[in-house]
Amino acid sequence: MRVLLGLVLLLATPAMAQDRLSLAPGTETASDGSTVRYEAGAIEVPENRTKPDSRKIRVGVLRIKAAKDIGQPPIFLLVGGPGVTLLDTLGDPSPLAKRRLRMWLDHAETNDLVIVEQRGYTLRGDMLELRYPAALLDRPSRIEDDIAVTRKLAEGAAAANPGHDLTGYTIAECADDVDSVRRALGYPRISLTAASFGSQWAFAVLKRHPGTVARGLISLVEPLANGYDMPAQVFAVMQRVAFEAEQGPALRPFIPQGGLIAAARTVRDRFAKGPVTVEVPGTGKVVLGLGDFQRALLSHVTDASRWPAFVIDAYNGRYQAWAAEEVESRKASTASLIGPLIDTATGVTAARWAQIQTDPALDMLGPWNFAAYAATADLWPTADLGDAFRLPVRDETPILFVQGDWDANTPVENLVDVLPWFPNARALIVHRGQHNGRLLRDRPDLDAATMRFLRDGTMPALPGRVDAAPVKFALPASTG
């Protein structure tokens, strides 16, 4: 159980006296029964640092002091998203939260651990959200409708959030928040551990505040210029999954002639000719179209164990499970406002945009990953940050990159794009690694080596590639 004490720590430096950090101590219990002593609170920072009269907002901060200080920089943990919080771990009795607390203790064994939340999505400040309307069940999903909904949300964002200067909710400002916390806590330099959007956030810290980062452990790599995924690189993940699934004896009897990729294309061509109506028990009819299939191809491959069975069932006209999922996905929902604010401001270069628009895999996957944001980028309050910000530059910071080659959210080619700019970096590719935070769970020796690097800077002699455990693929619906 959490115990929150009344002591409040007020920390500031003369250079950033306006950034007032208030932390209060408390305790939690980790999964193994260990006591987790922490300080949690918020830092007050300008909503938009480019405006001298900007109002102050609060951004959540947590610190766990090192159990045994070895004189090394603190570890700043940057979470993914945008629109994810970690401070909801405090007071959460779930096993997942307790395991996360144990991980935090491991990070804080010899270094302070600091977590900075994302402005606009912080439990110690504002939680800015969008409300997406329900989509109709009697018509297929269309990219034109997705753009129209996004346009309406963009045009109404400012009016829906009175008193907020939404122009300040960019990844550049998030990076400056990290540096404000660094200075308020009196750390000359910090180390970063980050994944997914957190990796993009880490690149922004490196770009905005050169020399302040001692080292970084970055996984699920998303460079600043790669916010919109290249369809062919995502499709390549499906090809890798398909090849392995076709080799295993469990699925071999169900693989359509020509293989899974050919089967997926057959289904794509079928839906290109017209939508299909499916009866969902307890709901009624739902109409599935080409756009729904394109989105489902991507959503299912994010869990590679499910993707082959989805393709096989769709190939054989068994749409019931997919249709039930589609009913859920079309319900009204909420999402973080900072998602589109940050992503449209970060954007992509003109060269990447031209490549995306002519990508050969667009016919299979469609433009769902980027079309709505690209079409409405000028309508969201945040301004484009420009190529000078998003393009990489040479950086001598020691970085250890860990990346999976079955990651459809942040494809492995992202790492290829950014690696040459970090001459002191090492890269470890995890074959079968997907988009999750435990890429090295099957190799505790390598996991420990990466943690040692994060703690004291010792760059391990890692292999360039390791295999994750083979995936147990789900069977298609025909097997019962």
Image (cartoon, rainbow, N blue to C red):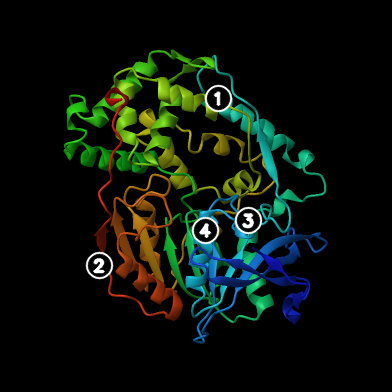
Please name the residue that numbered disc 1 is placed on: 144
Q: Residue 57's image quarter?
A: bottom right
The residue type indicated by label 1 comes to Glu
Amino acid type, residue under disc 2 in the picture: Pro
- The residue shown at (37%, 37%) is 359
Q: CA distance from mark 1 to mark 3?
A: 36 Å
Q: Amino acid at mark 4?
A: Gly
What residue lies at 60% left-to-right and 46% top-to-bottom? 339
In the rendered structure, are the residues bearing label 1 and label 2 in contact, judged by CB atoms less than 8 Å apart? no
Mark closer to the observer (3, 4) = 3
Counting residues from the N terminus, which is met first, the one under dot 1 or under dot 3? 3
| Front label number (1 vs 2) | 2
Q: CA distance from mark 3 to mark 4?
A: 17 Å
Mark 3 neighbour class, 10 Å CA radius: few under 14, some 14 to 19, many 20 or more: few
Relative to residue 242, is residue 186 depicted above or below? below
Q: Are marks 3 and 2 in contact (CB under 8 Å)?
A: no
Residue assigned mark 4: 198
- Residue identified by numbered label 3: 88
Tell me which amino acid carries mark 3. Asp
Counting from the top left corner in percent of width and height, residue 220 is at: 42, 55
Identify the mark at residue 463; answer none if there is no mark: 2
User: Of the residues under marks 4 and 1, which one precedes in the sequence?
Assistant: 1
In percent of width and height, residue 466 lies at 25, 60
